[in-house]
Amino acid sequence: MDEKELKTALEGILFAMGDSVETEKLAAALETDEETISKVLDSLAAEYEKEERGYRILKLEKAYQMCTASEIYEYLIRIAKQPKKLQLTDVLLETLSIIAYKQPITKAEIEKIRGVSCDHAVSKLVEYNLVAEIGRLDAPGKPMLFGTTEDFLRSFGIGSISDLPVMNPVQVEEFKLQAEEEVERQLAESVD
């Protein structure tokens, strides 16, 4: 199969599948290697970007997906009245950030960092399919471990968890101090 035939086949498969497809599965189906699949799909994605087409090929860790270009999102909503944007409150964003940076993580670990219960926030993030149960911790009670999903990567426009911004250690310390001050303030208010 030459490169043109490979592009055509990959384009058709990604269009028909709708969801992401792992390079391993694509390589097996098209009887070639994963490196070739990635090279051809990266080239096709660059073509779409350069030609400013209404669709893009998104790379998500070891998978690819065809999706609508973000520039036409508002027009799509006028027709489909979906997809609607998720309303992420500060609490949900904070919880999601903790999960993204610390995954895999248990609810107890999230609560230790946040200082408050996280049941509602984690449940909402699971409902939005930004977070999922990814296993169980080998400890008493076998608590659930949570991590981010492909929808998280798509929603925030990143290809992999390794693409998350690196936290500045000085900022981390400042955040810790702010959090401790907030806890002390809340304790003082509850005593009054």
Image: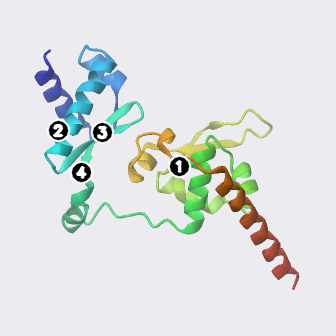
* Farthest front residue in view: 170
Indicate which disc, 1 or 2, sits on the residue closer to the N terminus.
Answer: 2
- Residue on which disc 2 sits: 47
**Residue 181 vertical position relative to residue 124 in the rendered view, above or below:** below
Where residue 192 appears, x then y in whole percent?
87, 86
Q: Is residue 3 left or right of residue 189?
A: left
Number of the label disc, if any, that sits on residue 20: none
Indicate which disc, 1 or 3, sits on the residue closer to the N terminus.
Answer: 3
- Residue on which disc 3 sits: 65
Q: How is the image coloured?
A: rainbow
- Residue on which disc 1 sits: 131
**Residue 56 vertical position relative to residue 41 in the rendered view, above or below:** below
User: Who's the residue at 54% across and 60% down the image?
Assistant: 124
Q: CA distance from mark 1 to mark 3?
A: 19 Å
Number of the label disc, if any, that sits on residue 68: 4
**Residue 173 vertical position relative to residue 147 in the rendered view, above or below:** below
Which element is circle 1 on?
strand
Q: In the picture, residue 23 is in which quadrant?
A: top left
User: Who's the residue at 14% across and 15% down the image?
Assistant: 1
* Viewer-side residue, 99 vs 84: 99
Q: Do tag 3 and tag 4 residues touch (Cβ < 8 Å)? A: no
Indicate which disc, 4 or 2, sits on the residue closer to the N terminus.
Answer: 2
Where residue 34 appears, x then y in whole percent?
33, 20
Q: Is residue 113 left or right of residue 126?
A: right
